[in-house]
Amino acid sequence: DAKTTQPPSMDCAEGRAANLPCNHSTISGNEYVYWYRQIHSQGPQYIIHGLKNNETNEMASLIITEDRKSSTLILPHATLRDTAVYYCIVRNRDDKIIFGKGTRLHILP
Amino acid sequence: DAGITQSPRHKVTETGTPVTLRCHQTENHRYMYWYRQDPGHGLRLIHYSYGVKDTDKGEVSDGYSVSRSKTEDFLLTLESATSSQTSVYFCAIRDTEAYGYTFGSGTRLTVV
């Protein structure tokens, strides 16, 4: 039973920043926020994760609110290759990953 | 990449026949997982393993069994395939550093 709420779909213009929201109002203190994406017919791909602080890597940035009840994944300069389903997952590090329905992101040329 | 391969990549089989899917990893990770993905249902966990000979059920384990006789291989068996088991099957390993998962490329199974 997924602990997160994401919009079913979003559009973003190519070259713009894509901001994908996720609500996780019941997150507990030792649960992390993970983001994965799945490009059509491929296996899901890990993007980033965080506990409290904002995180950045070569793929994306993760902004977690101070109360930790929501977060935003930011793809700074979206390209057509970023078209995918994006999954926000909340879990303890030792827990299994249970996927929700995710957000289908369309990058528009 | 994490060195995870699934075989076969595609398979067509008849109802009632046994089918075994293989997941192989080269990095000695302890935790391995099998998921299935169907339109309208997303990814659902079938079984997972937390070590050699240590396995447990996931969300949709009925009709499936698994075995892990060595660290590198995690086998998923459909004892008697049914049409409802037509799906794309993904294997995953858990990375010890970030505790994230790395997924294989998937096996597309069609039961006719």
Image (cartoon, rainbow, N blue to C red):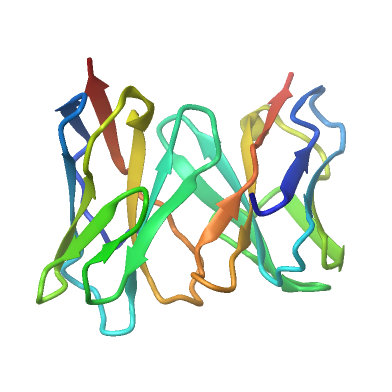
Q: Position of residue A59 (x, y in %)?
A: 36, 48
The one of B21 and A93 positioned closer to us in this rendering: A93
In the picture, residue B20 is in which quadrant? top right
| B29 left or right of A83 in image | right
Q: Residue drawn at (82%, 39%), measured in percent from left and top?
A: B80
Camera sees residue A31: yes
Seen in the picture, residue A19 relative to B47 is either above or below; the reply is: above
In the image as oriented, which residue stretches furthest toward the top?
Answer: A109
Quarter that holds the N terminus of chain A: bottom left
In the image as oriented, which residue stretches furthest toward the left?
Answer: A66
Quarter that holds the C terminus of chain A: top left
The one of A2 and A61 positioned closer to us in this rendering: A61
In the image as oriented, which residue stretches furthest toward the bottom?
Answer: A29
Camera sees residue A33: no
- Number of marks in picture: 0
Q: Position of residue B86 (x, y in %)?
A: 65, 29
Q: Residue drawn at (83%, 31%), measured in percent from left and top?
A: B16
Seen in the picture, residue B21 relative to B51 is either above or below; the reply is: above
Seen in the picture, residue B80 relative to A89 is either above or below; the reply is: above
The one of B81 and A52 positioned closer to us in this rendering: A52
| B70 left or right of B112 in image | right
The one of B87 and A45 positioned closer to us in this rendering: A45
Seen in the picture, residue A51 relative to A20 is either above or below; the reply is: below
| B105 left or right of A51 in image | right
Q: Residue drawn at (22%, 74%), measured in percent from left and top?
A: A53
In the picture, residue B55 is in which quadrant? bottom right
Q: Position of residue B25 (x, y in %)?
A: 77, 56
Q: Position of residue A99 (x, y in %)?
A: 41, 52
In the picture, residue B71 is in which quadrant? bottom right
